Amino acid sequence: DDAIPYVGMEQSSSSMQEERTPIPGMPNCPITGLPMIDPVVAADGHTYERHAIQRWFQTSNRSPLTGAVLAHLELVPNYSLLSSVDGLTNHVSNS
């Protein structure tokens, strides 16, 4: 499941699985080590791939990076990272 990040949806016989494609220039998730597709910021201020940190929260309320107890388990999309990577991608493709 964490082996390759994908974009889109694909129906399998046993379950619905996401098919995602890495975004060029996207940094790696500190949990999976893979390029992020849906980067979100957790209460520790660090950015993670949404599915990875949600899975982490199923068993822990601590930061995967610092080990500190998190004030809350809400996740916020990292629009800043998405727009900077999008801007970089557009700049490179227009060069």
Image: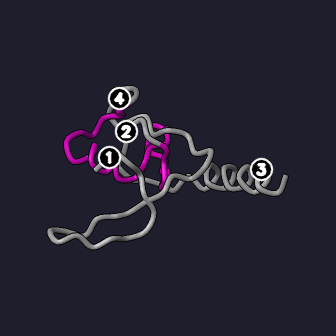
Distance in Å between CA atoms under marks 1 and 3: 28 Å
Residue contact between numbered discs 1 and 2, judged by CB atoms under 8 Å: yes
Residue 76 location, x and y as percent?
A: 48, 55
Of callouts 1 and 4, which one flags the residue occurring earlier in the amino acid sequence?
A: 1
Q: Is residue 87 above or below residue 67?
A: below
Q: Quadrant of residue 19?
A: bottom left
Pick the residue in front: 21 or 55.
Answer: 21
Colour logic: one colour
Is-magenta flag for residue 37?
Answer: yes
Q: Which residues are magenta?
A: 35-64
Identify the residue position indicated by label 4 in the image: 68
Badge 2 crowding class, 10 Å Cα cut-off, few under 14, some 14 to 19, many 20 or more, is some
How far across and how far down the image is residue 9, in percent? 37, 70
Looking at the rendered structure, the kind of residue marked 2 is Thr
Q: Residues within 10 Å of mark 3 (few under 14, many from 20)?
A: few
Callout 2 secondary element = loop
- What type is the residue that disc 4 sits on? Ala
Q: Are marks 1 and 4 in contact (CB under 8 Å)?
A: no
Query: Nearer the observer, disc 3 or disc 4?
Result: 3
Of pointers 1 and 2, the one earlier in the residue sequence: 1
Q: Which residue is mark 2?
A: 32
Q: Which residue is mark 3?
A: 92
